[in-house]
Image (cartoon, grey):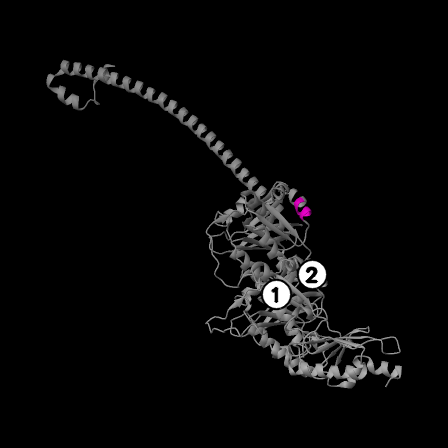
Amino acid sequence: MKNNGPQSATPTARLPKCPTGIRGLDEITSGGLPRGRPTLVCGGAGCGKTLFAVEFLVRGAVQFGEPGVFMSFEETDAELKSNVASLGFDLAGLVRRNKIVLDHVHIERSEIQETGEYDLEGLFVRLNHAIDSIGARRVVLDTLEALFAGLPNEAILRAELRRLFRWLKDKGVTAVITAERGREQLTRHGLEEYVSDCVIVLDHRVNDQIATRHLRVVKYRGALHGTNEFPFLIGEEGLSVLPITSLGLNHKVSNARISTGIPRLDAMLGGRGFFRGSSILLTGTPGTGKTSVAAYFAQAAARRGDRVLFFSFEESPNQIIRNMRSIGLRLEPLVQRGCLRFHAARPTLCGLEMHLATMFREIAAFQPAVVIVDPITSLLAAGADFETKGMVTRLIDFLKGGQVTSLFTSLTQSGHALQQSEIAMSSLMDSWLLLQDFDGNGERNRVLYVLKARGMAHSNQVREFLISNRGIDLVDAYIGPSGVLTGASRVAQAAREKAETLTSQQEAARRKRELERKRATLEQQIAGMRSEYKTEEAELRRTDEQVGTRTRVLTAERTELARLRQADAIRAASRTPGKPKPKSKR
Amino acid sequence: MRTRTVKRAELGSSRRPARLWELRLYVAGQTPKSLTAFANLKQICETHMQGRYHIEVIDLVEQPQLSKGDQILAIPTLVRKLPQPMRKIIGDLSDTERVLVGLNLRSADVGGGEL
C-alpha cells in the first residue's frame, strides 16, 4: 500500500472496462466491470457469488493475462480448488504458475480478545503482499462480511472497510467483493455504502419448483448497462449470462433457399422452400405429423451436407430414428456421419434458462446450419409466458445472428384456440405451417396450410398431408360444393367422379354409335331412293324417246300428208301439230 | 522499539516448574498504536511473568509474508504461542484486565495463588 501511489485517474470519455470473460456479462455491461474499481457482487446463499468471483479471476488470468488474488474469508484454499475443479478451472495449476494467489483468511472470534485500539493494517499488508508478489490486476474478496462476525468492534471495522475500498482503488486493481444479501438492504452489513461504482445482484429463485438464477446490474456508475434481470446459469464451463447476443434486429439476411425435403411443400413455398437463416414455426394438434415434417427437413438438410442439430424434448433420439424409419427416413447414417446430432432432454429437467443455455452451448459447439426444436411448447411449460417469449426471442435472435435456419414445432391442444400459445411466437417467425386434423366420416385426416411465409409467394391452398411407409406426400384436397374432402371421402369422391366420367364417356360412345347407325340407315335409304329415281329416270327417258320418235314419225307423216294435199299449208300445220288429220288415216 | 526484539529473562529462578510464555507481537511499522502496545505488553509481562516470557516482535511492513501464518488481520495483534492453546489479543493492550484474561494469566495466577 505504501509503494503504490494513487493511480492517475485520467478522465476519458469512456470508462475503461475490465472484461470478465463471463459469457453474456460483458455484453450486458458493454465491456465488463469498471477497471480499477471495486465491484460488489451480492446475493443469497448458493447463488453463485464465489463462482462468479473465481471465474472473473481465472478468465482474467487465462484469457486476458491479468493475474489475480483471491482472498477468501470462508473457504480454504484446498476447498476452493476442488470446488471449482468441477467447472474445469485449474486453480491449482494457475497458482503453481503464479497467475493466481489464493489466500484464506481465517478469523475465529473465540480466539480473539479485544484490548483497545486497533486497525486492519494486517489485512492491508497481507493483500498488498499478495498483489505485489504476482503483479495482480484483479482482486477478489470473497465474503468480506465474515469480518463482521470475526471482529467485535463494528465501528473500527466500518472505518477500515472504507479505507480498504479507497486503497483498492488507489492500487488500481479491479476488485470483486462478494457479500451476503440482506433483508432490506442489498447486503447484510450495508457494504453497498462503500462500493458505489458497480453493484451486481445475483439471485436464485424457485418458481413452480423450478429454480432459476438471475443476475442484475443494479448500478454501474458512468456506464450504460442493461438493467434487466438476466437469467444465468452455472454450467460445465462456468457461468453464462443470457442473452448471449444483444437483442437487436440487425442480423444479416440471406436470399438462399433451402428445401423442406418435401417437393410438394417446396412447391407451396414458391417452389424453392424456406429462406436460409429464417425461423419456421410448425404448429399442429397431437399426431398431425409435426415431428415427421421436421425430420424430413432435417434429413434433406443433412443430405445436402448442412449440419443439423435436433433438440428433442419429447422423444429419445433412438425413438425418433426408429419412428422415422417407419416412414422411410434413414437418419442413422446421417448421425454416424456427424451431419445430424440429437440433443434430448426432459423439459422438466431444469428451468427454461438452463435449457436455453444448454441449447446455446450445444449450438456453439456443433455450429449447425439448421436447428430443430421439437417441440418448443414443452419448454413453454417450464416458464411463464413472458419469460418464454423472451427466451424464444433470444433463441431466434441468436440463431438468426448466426444465419442458422430454425424450425420449431409447436403442439396445440385440440379444442383450444388454435393460435393461443402461438400468439407470442408467431410474430417472431418468418414462416408458419399449420398441420391440422380433419375429422369426419369416421376418420381423421391431416391437412397442411402455409399460414405465412415472409418474403415469398406461397400457396394459400389446403393440402392433404399423407404419411405412408414411403414417406410424406401432399395431395390436393378435393374442394367441392360440399366443402373440403380428404382421406376416404376424397378417394370416394374421386372414384365417383371417375365412374361418372366413365358413364358419360360410354353414353357418348353409345350415342355416337347410334348416330352412325342412323346415318348408315339414312344412307341406305338415300341409295335406295336414288336407284329408284334412276329407274324412273330411265323409264322417263325411254318414254321420252318413244314420244320423240312418235312425234317425228307423226310430223313426217303430216308433212308428207300436207305435201300431198297443199304445199302452202305446211307452215300452218307445223304450227299446229296437235290437230292432225292423219288420225283418220290410222 | 526494534523489530524482532527478544526479551528473555533468566529462567529457572522459580521454584515451580518453569512455565514459559512465548508471545509474538505483530505490528506494521512504528505507529503510535504499535508503540503503545509494545510498552503495555512489556509492562504486563514484567509485572506478571517476570523471567518467564519471550516476546518476538514482527513488523509486517518488513515481512508481509508472515501475516499469513498466524492469520493476522488486525494490528497490533499479540499472539500467545505458548502455553497452548494459541490465543490472539488485538488492540493496543491498554485494557490490562482483558490482556490478562486473554493471556490466561488472570485465572492461572489466581489458581497458583501468586497474586
Badge number at residue A164: none
Say which quadrant the N terminus of chain A sits in: bottom right
Residue A519 magenta? no
The numbered mark, 2 or 1, whose residue comes first in the sequence reads 2
Within 10 Å of disc 2 (Cα), the crowding (few <14, some 14-19, many 20+) is some
Q: CA distance from mark 2 to mark 1?
A: 20 Å
Can residue A314 be seen at all in this image of the molecule? yes
Prevailing secondary structure of the magenta residues: helix
Residue at image mark 1: A133
**Image position of A497 with respect to A412: above or below:** above
Secondary structure of residue under mark 1: helix
Badge number at residue A81: 2
**What's the amino acid at mark 2?**
Lys
Q: Between residues A139 and A491, which one lies in front from this camera angle?
A: A139
Write the start and end of the magenta stretch as one range. Answer: A317-321
Q: Between residues A260 and B25, which one lies in front from this camera angle?
A: B25
> x, y percentage for residue B48?
81, 83
Q: Chain of mark 2?
A: A
Extreme-left residue of the structure: A568
Within 10 Å of disc 1 (Cα), the crowding (few <14, some 14-19, many 20+) is some
**Image position of A274 with respect to A121: above or below:** above
